[in-house]
Image (spheres, helix red, strand yellow):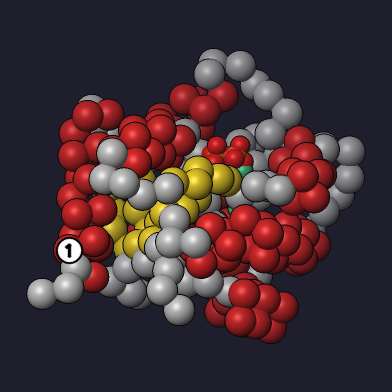
Amino acid sequence: MARGYFITFEGGDGSGKTTQIRLLRPYVQAMGYTVVCTREPGGTPFAESIRSLLVTDNRHNVSAACELALFIASRLHHVQNVIKPALQRGGVVLCDRYMDSAVVYQGFAGALGMDRVIKSHEALMGGDLIIPDATICLDIDPNIGVLRSQGGNKNEDRFENKPLDFHRKVRYGFLQLAQTSPRYTVINAHQDICDIFEEVKQIWEKLTDEHRPR
Ligand code: TYD
């Protein structure tokens, strides 16, 4: 199957993923690609409904395993209805978080076990578990990232409001995960936005260069 490129952006809260996706979109479009920017949890109306349960509804006591089941349900709907069709049309999908967030947030920081989270995805998503062509991990000190994403105000985000120790584990988990496959690149997100974008562009160039006919 000829298909486009699937690039995911990962990292702790407030690491600047959304800003980098906004910068990369026009750059890739200028090369003639159709670009779909999307996010997880979410990306379809059904998955966005699950998102509000997971991210903003603080009324319930929800275990990490229960969270995982909901994240996978929203992910499967998103892949089947948005990501897979876009890739099959030859488009470029830029996704703000994907499966690696579950591996780190529920598997590592939430203590379910990274392997268990990966196996759960494989079991439930089967052939719809599309592995990204490249994953950009923006690495930030959670002291800075969480404050940045809260914009100085405490909000209702269930994950941002977790203790600092949870966010430290998230950071460590992403750094560990990034060592397991060449598809990951870690970028120091304490740098200037333009310097980060230079590194993001290099990842895009390398990816497309690898697939260019010689
Ligand atoms: P969001 O506001 O999108 O965070 P950010 O802007 O930092 O990306 O909230 C999504 C939250 O959900 C984020 O804290 C990470 C968490 N999450 C998981 O725990 N598991 C997952 O599989 C995904 C996709 C997100």
- Quarter holding residue 63: bottom right
Q: Residue furthest left?
A: 214
Q: Above or below — where is 213 with respect to 192?
A: below
Task: Identify the residue at horizontal 37%, vertical 66% (top origin).
Answer: 133
Task: Identify the residue at horizontal 28%, vertical 39% (top origin).
Answer: 30
In this view, the residue in front, 170 or 186, is 186
Q: Above or below — where is 202 with respect to 154?
A: below
Quarter of the image with the C terminus is bottom left
Q: What residue is pinned by disc 1?
A: 209
Q: Above or below — where is 182 with respect to 144?
A: below
Quarter of the image with the N terminus is bottom left
Left/right placement of residue 171 relative to residue 82 reads left
Can residue 162 be seen by looking at this rendering?
no
Task: Identify the residue at horizontal 76%, vertical 36% (top origin).
Answer: 56
Q: Residue furthest top?
A: 152
In this view, the residue in front, 45 or 49, is 45
Measured as percent of width and height from the top left, residue 204 is found at 25, 53
- Quarter holding residue 145: top left
Measured as percent of width and height from the top left, residue 15 is found at 41, 37
Measured as percent of width and height from the top left, residue 171 is found at 43, 51
